[in-house]
Amino acid sequence: MRRSYGSRVPRSGVEFDLFGSGSGATPIVAPATPGSSPETAIPVASLTETARAVIEGSFSPLWVRGEVSDFKRHRNGHWYFCLRDASAQVRCVVWSRSQRGIPASPDEGMEVTAFGQLTVYSARGEMHLNVTALDAIGDGLWRKAMEETRMRLDREGLLAPERKRALPSAPTRVGMVTSPDGAALRDVISVIRRRAPHVSLVVSAATVQGPGAPAEIVAAIQRICRFGEIDVLIVGRGGGAREDLWAFNSEAVARAIADSTVPVISGVGHEIDVTIADLIADHRAATPSAAAEAAVPMRSDLLAALRDMSDELCASLAERASRARSDLESGAMALRRAASIDAERRRAAISATAGRLNALSPLATLARGYAVARDPVSRATLASVADFKPGAPFTLTLRDGDVAARVADKP
């Protein structure tokens, strides 16, 4: 029997040949398909689960490009937003566990590329993109994350210039936090051997890129600080892509550098690369080699500096001795002058006193022709007539000697 294209399957599930031989046609019974009739209707949950399975099976994880809109950060940490272009949109979600590799949340209107699995949220029957990686067109997200970290540190004063410590002028032991297998370590060793072979290098190994790098760098810095015999610390690595250097933009690494007990030199990447570690370190070097040069002065430069210091010290001592000699001579001259003036003043005072004493002296009176009657025994002055007894002896003291006398009679 030839079947026509006009055949159909009625709701009963029995197929008829509408253009066959008529009443003698034999019905063909086909199996019922879920959802093909009210009797085989499927639950909504089955429908959305089936749609999810079909979509996830049809689409491998892929990158989607669009503009961010309706961004919301849920209290449980998940991000919800839409990616849209001029004619369509798709809902997106970034679970909190997937945010570790994303530098920052996107801004409203930012054009991004999102990587994820297209799926269906069964509970609502909504299709969305389950995003596991997100990047802005250009460096928007990376720049935003770095700026947010910089602003937090700046608000706490950790980027203030007055916090910067001076590097030691003649270190004997340098520490370094880096990968033991990287070119940065070899460059630093080469520079130190060339410039100052007497300086020793202590390496605290750490992974310098990847998800676990920030924690390892922090632990390595703290290990060096506990060692306690380091004059200056270099933290760095060689060049690489933006993602490779991202560990040095970690806030945890920045705070470890700020808490270091010794001055820190940051030498990350190439000259054009600037990281948060560069901003918070006591000294920023363009490369690890430049960091080693900043940490360790040339031995010949140190010797020349010592010679210059010796010459300056000798000159200073000679100048000081000359100045002291001049001061001493000036002081001696001033002392002689002061002593002469004082002696002259004392001489004049003595002369004046002597004149006054001479004017009051009995000898001066005697020199003018006067005499003093005295008792010959007690030498007491006989100043009154009553002191003279008839016949009593007495002495007259004259200018040039004594004369013995006797009272003849009372007047």
Image (cartoon, grey):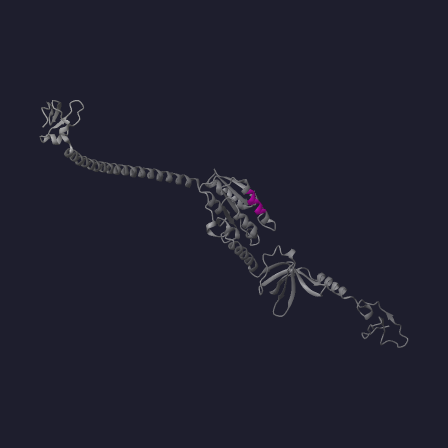
Q: Is 396 in front, or is 117?
A: 396
Q: Tell whether 33 sits left or right of 68.
A: right
Q: Disc count in the image? A: 0
Q: Is 225 in front, or is 3?
A: 225
Residue 130: where, in percent of width, then height?
66, 60
Residue 176: where, in percent of width, then height?
53, 44
Residue 317: where, in percent of width, then height?
33, 37
Q: In which quarter of the image is the N terminus?
A: bottom right
Q: Tell whether 195 sits left or right of 389.
A: right
Q: Is 14 in front, or is 382?
A: 382
Q: In this view, does 227 lie above or below 105?
A: above
Which residue: 70% across, 65% down?
Answer: 126
Which residue: 57% across, 59% down?
Answer: 141
Q: In this view, does 51 lie above or below 378?
A: below
Which residue: 47% across, 44% down?
Answer: 295
The residue stretch that appears in magenta: 216-224
Residue 224: where, in percent of width, then height?
54, 42
Q: Which residue lies furthest to the right in this view?
A: 24
Q: Is residue 30 above or below residue 171?
A: below
Q: Quadrant of the C terminus?
A: top left
Q: Is 255 in front, or is 90?
A: 255
